[in-house]
Image: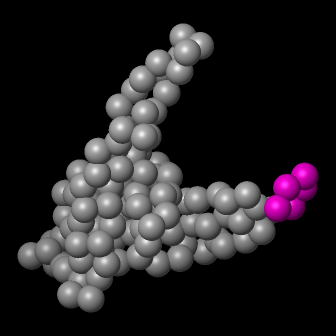
Amino acid sequence: MTITFPYGETVTVLRAGLAPDGYDNQVRDWPNATSTPYPGCAVAQNGRDESLTGDRNAIASDLIVFMPSAADVVATDRLEIRSRAYEVVGEPFDWVSPFSGTAFGTVVYCNRVEG
């Protein structure tokens, strides 16, 4: 049994291949990324939404996203949530209850720094 969120929102996985940057480096080709939408996701703040200090005014936001089980998302992807792109942080993982065996879905941590 997989848990679904009937009032969840659509989160889109953005995946970019590698392309040369003109300096003999391979970089992610975000303008030509593929996109795969996943409806029924749950999105929550993950403990940090803060202003960074120093030489710039920046806002850092961390989110945790609960996606359908076995969602095709990897550490090099981005997630589009509410029209904003977030970097995936670490490896996504499938969350399964050790008590019931219920698959709750794929858990993804992500962040965004603006400014």
Position in image of residue 45 (x %, y %): 53, 76
Residue that lies at the very extreme toward the right in this rendered image: 55
Is residue 55 inside the magenta stretch?
Answer: yes
Say which residue appears at 49% left-offset and 27% top-offset.
27
70, 30: nearer the viewer: 30
Position in image of residue 47 (x %, y %): 61, 74
Main SS of residues in magenta: loop
Is residue 19 inside the magenta stretch?
Answer: no
Q: Is residue 39 above or below residue 35?
A: below
Q: In this rendering, does residue 48 appear at all?
A: yes
The stretch in magenta equals 53-57
Position in image of residue 42 (x %, y %): 35, 78
Position in image of residue 82 (x %, y %): 44, 72
Q: Is residue 41 above or below residue 111?
A: below
Quarter of the image that includes the C terminus: bottom right
Quadrant position of residue 12:
bottom left
37, 60: nearer the viewer: 37
49 displayed left or right of 2:
right
114, 72: nearer the viewer: 114
Say which residue appears at 19% left-offset and 57% top-offset.
70
Residue that lies at the very extreme toward the top in this rendered image: 24
